[in-house]
Image (cartoon, grey):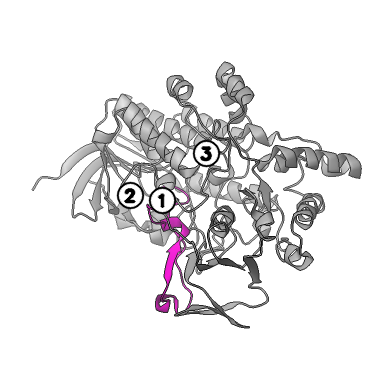
């Protein structure tokens, strides 16, 4: 049986995969997209837990490549919900007629490079095998759940769910006693919604997180009008900020350049704006422990203002890591939820979970009877999806083995020893420290331009050199070490996954600096890469 052959195979049909398909098809390439889910949407297909919504304002968290698309889609809320984002991505798939080249309900299990032909052999869980010149991993940074590893979890007699694999029809918690394990972003978004339904919610907190209000609501007509009138300018402004987010409004002013009253006023102003604006107040917040503590204490003060019980407020107040070193959460009434009589907090630092029992959750102090358990325990971030695929490059080298001590890439885009393979927003790029929509578009355009450049010169193979990769990894680490980010046991570091190497994975040098580096590499004929016309590199 002859294997189907494509110019390119794309793994994943979320924000990255859809735009990648659109770009490559416009270049006249034959493309196949494989998506494990039953719909396009990626992160916004899988993450449908209660209260799931984006933490960047809707207008900014959307494609900019098509002014027509940008103009015709009208967002209903300041921070779009998961259903609205999924509708948007389905609209994109239909508007650009992408569906004929997308195969759903298909998980890629292996990708093996054939040096004799300069082609990748892609295998799926359906028993299919195809070949492609180019392989693009658009697998997403937050697409693989952290596995449940509590002793006795399988013995629980009630229903249980992981926030990352929520039932499509939703869950009705009316009249139930619910245990929620975790207080990361998915928990912070879902707990207020679950508490509005359930008879009682017991929150099991491993580490308190900093959270700021979204102040969500219908899109402000004035904001929509400004966006419509100045769309190109607003997009350009976002691309020139370090995080790719206009609303952060970053200032270079250092914390102690202002007196306490001025600092308080600035923080209050940004708290009223909501979202990530707080992090832009002072330029040294993520570089100086003393400055960071000022911002952290402001948020802890807000928690004390909101939460009525002082003991609960203190338990909810983070003190073990710098603010911003873990992704700050954006919430709707999270802290206020703990004022409800049907919500209680268990601090797992005082009483760790020992086991899941048939009727509840047992800690070192007592057993909490629950009817249902929600595991809000996060993701195997940035590398999790790639680790699920048997990827083998030149000489049969295994990516899993190459990354045993942590991921190593060139620009977060390419991997030495794995020719003609690209990653969209991979480790070593700004990715999760940036507006993902901005980061994705930049990566997709760089990859498609590279493929076009290769085609114009009839070149057959490109890959990063070990030297260029080593230098880039060293630079990523050097920049990270100049900040407070490595001081937190975050998923940026892989610290939430048992046995995963502790390596700071994203690039924190800022999106504009990173984009300029990528442009420089391309302008210089893909400097740092081996380019060959055939199998002899």
Label 2 close to label 1 by CB (< 8 Å): yes
Which label belongs to residue 46? 1
Looking at this rendering, what residue extends furthest in the left direction?
A: 1
Depth check: give the residue in front, 78 or 289: 78
Task: Determine the residue located farthest toward the front in the rendered image.
Answer: 175
Residue hosting label 2: 37
Residue stretch in magenta: 140-169
Give SS at disc 1.
helix
Q: In terms of image quadrants, where is residue 308?
A: bottom right
Is the stretch drawn in magenta largely helix, strand or loop? loop
Q: Quadrant of residue 351?
A: bottom right
Circle nearer the N terminus (3, 2): 2
Q: Is residue 86 left or right of residue 288?
A: left
Q: CA distance from mark 3 to mark 2?
A: 21 Å
Front residue (pair 12, 154) = 154
Does the stretch in magenta take in 327?
no
Q: Position of residue 516 (x, y in %)?
A: 57, 31
State the CA–CA distance, disc 2 to disc 1. Answer: 8 Å
Q: Estimate how packed mark 3 is, as few (under 14), some (14 to 19) or many (20 or more) residues with alpha carbons within 10 Å.
A: many
Q: Which residue occupies 39% across, 60% down?
A: 400
């Amino acid at each position: 049986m002859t294997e189907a052959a494509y110019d390119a195979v794309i793994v994943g049909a979320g924000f990255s995969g859809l735009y990648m398909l659109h770009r490559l098809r416009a270049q006249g390439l034959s493309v196949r997209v494989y998506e494990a889910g039953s719909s396009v949407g990626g992160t916004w297909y899988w993450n449908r837990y209660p209260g799931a919504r984006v933490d960047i304002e809707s207008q900014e968290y959307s494609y900019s490549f098509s002014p027509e698309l940008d103009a015709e889609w009208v967002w209903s809320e300041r921070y779009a919900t998961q259903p609205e984002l999924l509708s948007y991505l389905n609209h994109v798939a239909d508007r650009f007629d992408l569906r004929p080249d997308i195969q759903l309900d298909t998980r890629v299990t292996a990708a093996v490079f054939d040096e004799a032909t300069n082609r990748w052999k892609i295998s799926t869980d359906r028993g299919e095998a195809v070949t492609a010149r180019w392989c693009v991993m658009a697998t997403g940074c937050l697409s693989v759940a952290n596995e449940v590893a509590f002793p006795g979890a399988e013995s629980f007699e009630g229903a249980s769910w992981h926030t990352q694999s929520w039932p499509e029809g939703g869950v009705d918690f009316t009249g139930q006693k619910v245990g929620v394990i975790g207080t990361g972003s998915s928990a912070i978004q879902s707990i207020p919604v679950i508490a509005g339904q359930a008879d009682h919610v017991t929150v099991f907190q491993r580490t308190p997180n900093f959270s700021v209000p979204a102040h969500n609501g219908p899109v402000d007509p004035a904001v929509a009008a400004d966006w419509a009138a100045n769309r190109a300018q607003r997009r350009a402004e976002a691309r020139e900020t370090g995080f790719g987010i206009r609303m952060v409004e970053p200032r270079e002013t250092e914390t102690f350049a202002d007196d306490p009253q001025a600092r308080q006023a600035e923080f209050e102003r940004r708290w009223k704006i909501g979202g990530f604006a707080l992090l832009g107040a002072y330029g040294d917040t993520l570089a100086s422990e003393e400055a960071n503590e000022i911002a952290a204490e402001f948020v802890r003060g807000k928690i004390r203002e909101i939460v009525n019980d002082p003991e609960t407020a203190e338990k909810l107040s983070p003190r073990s890591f710098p603010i911003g070193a873990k992704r700050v959460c954006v919430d709707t009434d999270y802290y206020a939820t703990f004022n409800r009589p049907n919500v209680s907090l268990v601090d797992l630092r005082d009483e760790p979970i020992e086991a899941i029992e048939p009727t509840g959750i047992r800690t070192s102090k007592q057993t909490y009877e629950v009817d249902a358990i929600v595991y809000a325990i996060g993701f195997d971030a940035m590398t999790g999806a790639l680790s699920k695929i048997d990827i083998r490059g030149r000489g049969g080298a295994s990516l899993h083995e190459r990354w045993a001590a942590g991921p190593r890439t060139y620009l977060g885009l390419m991997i030495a020893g794995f020719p003609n393979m690209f990653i969209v927003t991979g480790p070593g790029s700004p990715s999760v420290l940036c507006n993902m929509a901005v980061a994705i578009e930049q990566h997709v355009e760089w990859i498609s331009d590279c493929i076009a450049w290769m085609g114009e010169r009839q070149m057959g193979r490109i890959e990063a050199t070990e030297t260029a990769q080593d230098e880039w990894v060293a630079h990523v680490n050097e920049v990270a070490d100049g900040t407070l980010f490595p001081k937190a046991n975050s998923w940026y570091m892989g610290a939430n996954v048992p046995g995963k190497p502790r390596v700071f994975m994203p690039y924190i040098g800022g999106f504009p600096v990173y984009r300029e580096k990528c442009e420089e590499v391309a302008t210089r004929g893909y400097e740092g890469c081996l380019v060959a016309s055939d199998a002899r590199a």
